[in-house]
Image: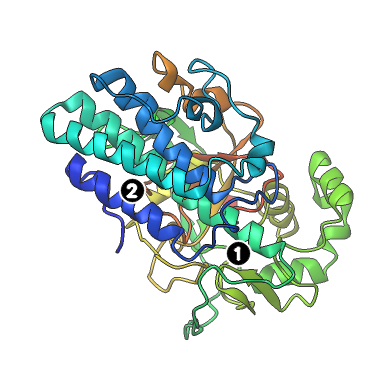
Amino acid sequence: MEPRTISAAPATAYVEVRDHTLECVASLSEEDMVVQSMPEASPAKWHLAHTTWFFETFILEPLARGYRSPDRSYAFLFNSYYQTVGPQYPRNRRGLLTRPPLAQVHRYRQHVDAAMEQMLARCASDGALAARVELGLAHEQQHQELLLTDVKHLFSCNPLAPAFRPVSIQSLPVRARALEWIEGPHGIVEIGSDGAGFSFDNEGPRHKVHLAPYALADRLVTNAEVREFIDAGGYRRGDLWLSDGWAQVQREDWQRPLYWHEDLAHTFTLTGTRTLEDHAPATHLSFYEADAYARWAKCRLPTEAEWEAVARTTLVRHAGELHPRAQEHEGFREAYGACWQWTASAYGPYPGFRAAAGSLGEYNGKFMANQMVLRGSSCVTPRGHARATYRNFFYPHSRWQFTGVRLAKDLS
């Protein structure tokens, strides 16, 4: 079952999004769901509990008269970063939470779901409640994607190279196509959410920007093209890298994208080890790698305003797959449903941005430093979660997410 877009009726959307999270973990063992493979990732069990804590903390406790949590320790264990709510268990130690056991976390979800469904039945016409539920569902969809990328990293550390979903995937008969350029709107353009439909607070306010003439590649950089970069000594040439990126390459001994095998012909995926498809979008590249590749290709990365100005007329596509594939449609290909695309834009507030009052104001604004913006969506982004104004953000060294590269160039 595909999760419903969050614009559906709140009660219906609530059930379907919450059920989809359980579908995401259906193939995992209890042991799989406890382990944390790196500080940036979280155990699957923690994702299940945290998304439940979100509804309990921001909807049930303040709005549902008489609601009581089944265990007050959950407020500490499953709070991610909300300082105004209370203290949090350290992120890098979540893999030590063997207790509460998984069965108890499932009972916690059932407890909160029952209270939420009663509340939604009583307050079906409450617009403020519907808006808060919509935010909670969008938050859970973010964690559905994070859960899959965290499990992929976990399984990649296992010498058995287990598959999250062991299915046979046939290579699509997609021919290699030469890169073409799409000239984007320039001059004064508007970007950002106009408030129509759901958006996160960091997507607004809508505002004007000036863009010099530019063009964006009509597709993402492919595995074959990244292999050419490697063969040309791209990971050994300090002149191609930003200073922090070159230090990262040396410190971590990067020689190829994350999950690629040493033979540069195979990669680890959520469906197990498979042959790299030359024409498929290259993924699991950090911002530093994306920037170095663009410089080697005598191009640059797009700004987020350039990306949005081109993408806003592009149909949002949902892949529903577990690994990126090339897309054959015309126009701005692979904007959605393949890989998140690094931009040259640092993550910061739009002009006029104000964080919401209260604890929910900590959702996005507090992270507006030292991170880079990504646009689009990935192959594991849930249906209904992508849009042209969406601002994803990660640290420039991060590469365990499905992140890829779209090139840009100046036309003046």
Q: Where is residue 392 in the image (x, y as percent from the top left)?
A: 50, 41
Q: Do the residues labelled 1 and 2 touch (CB within 8 Å)?
A: no
Q: Residue 213 carries which label?
A: none
**Can you say whether 216 is above or below 162 in the image?**
above
- Tag count in the figure? 2
Q: Seen in the image, is 25 located left or right of residue 97?
A: left
For the point 56% across and 39% down, the residue is 393
Q: How crowded is mark 1: few (under 14 residues within 10 Å), some or many (20 or more)?
A: many
Residue at 44% across, 62% down: 26
Q: Is residue 288 left or right of residue 64?
A: right
Horizontal relation, residue 346 to residue 114: left or right: right
Bin the neighbour count of mark 2 within 10 Å (Cα to Cα): few under 14, some 14-19, many 20 and up.
many
Q: Which amino acid does label 1 sit on?
A: Val
Quadrant of image for the N terminus = bottom left
Q: Quadrant of the C terminus?
A: top right
The alpha-carbon separation of the residues under discs 1 and 2 comes to: 35 Å
Residue kind at label 2, given as amino acid type: Arg
Can you tell which mark lies on residue 18? 2
Above or below, comparing residue 343 to residue 178 in the picture:
above
Residue 8 shows in the view: yes
Residue 43 placement (x, y as % from top left): 58, 48
- The residue indicated by pointer 1 is 221
* Residue 14 placement: quadrant: top left
- Does residue 113 lie above or below 3 as drawn? above
Q: Nearer the viewer, residue 368 or 118?
A: 118
Indicate which label's residue lies in the foreground, 1 or 2. 2
Q: Which of these two is toward me, 118 or 291?
A: 118
Assign a secondary structure to mark 2: helix
In percent of the image, x 56 and y 54: which residue is there? Answer: 33
What is the x, y in percent for residue 214? 53, 48
Q: In this view, does 35 lie to the left or right of 228?
A: left
